[in-house]
Image: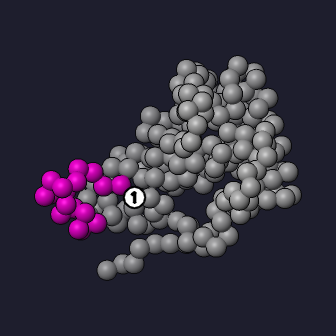
Amino acid sequence: MGELKKLVEEGKIKYIGLSEANVDTIKRAHKVHPITALQMEYSLWTREIEDEFIPLCRELGIGIVAYSPLGRGFFGGKVVDEAMPNGSLLANYPRFNGENLEKNKLLYTRVSNLAVKHGCTVPQLALAWLLHQGDDIVPIPGTTKVKNMVNNAGCLGLKLSEDDLKEIGDAVPVDEVVGERELGVFSKYDWKFANTPLK
């Protein structure tokens, strides 16, 4: 952070952001120089950041960049509406494997039913739910297809009430999501277990 602060002072960079940082790391880094944005995985089925991270970021004025806002494509219909592509890395993620996937498909069905109720697609509803979590949260859905990008943009037109948001969130209870969010080998390195060393 000290080196990044120097780069800001030299005019070489304008802002500093962190990704998948531990809460303690964020607090200590922010004391050295204000953090502009924190990139974390956040979606209907990955909500671990709600208890500590979102309140901390709001207290410190840090924006949140939500990656994998469609659950690594799950709420985009990957492996639910279409077969998993050969050689797909998703096959290695616990939530997309065997019995885990079959149980998680029930969550997708619930969201799909709510999408019908709201007259939109599942990805649009999942992204709209995320956008309604606060103006300081910006989802970054990734796609390789223009049609998906256009479809995703349709979420901007959805207006959801507090009751709608609760109903959507309740359709995907965090304790009913089966499987770790990260690849097994990497799960021990995510923000829960990693912290930068003290000086």
Where is residue 158 drawn, in percent x and y?
59, 22
Residue 61 versus residue 90 in the image, above or below: above
Quarter of the C terminus within the rendering: bottom left
Residue lying at 75% horizontally and 34% vertically, measured from the top left: 111
- The answer to whether 70 appears left or right of 199 in the picture is right
Nearer to us in this view, 71 or 129? 71
Where is residue 189 drawn, in percent x and y?
55, 72
Where is residue 22 drawn, in percent x and y?
47, 65
Where is residue 70 drawn, in percent x and y?
63, 43
Q: How many marks?
A: 1
Residue lying at 34% horizontally and 66% vertically, measured from the top left: 28
Amino acid beneath label 1: Leu
Quarter of the N terminus within the rendering: bottom left
User: Residue 127 falls in which quadrant of the image?
Assistant: top right
Q: Is residue 82 visible?
A: yes
Crowding around mark 1 (Cα neighbors within 10 Å: few <14, some 14 to 19, many 20+) is some
Q: Which element type, helix, strand or loop, lies under badge 1? A: strand
User: Residue 8 falls in which quadrant of the image?
Assistant: bottom left
User: Residue 166 falls in which quadrant of the image?
Assistant: top right
Residue segment shown in magenta: 1-18
Residue where numbered disc 1 is placed: 18
Residue at the extreme front of the image, as rendered: 86
Indicate whether residue 64 is drawn in magenta. no
Nearer to us in this view, 12 or 197? 12
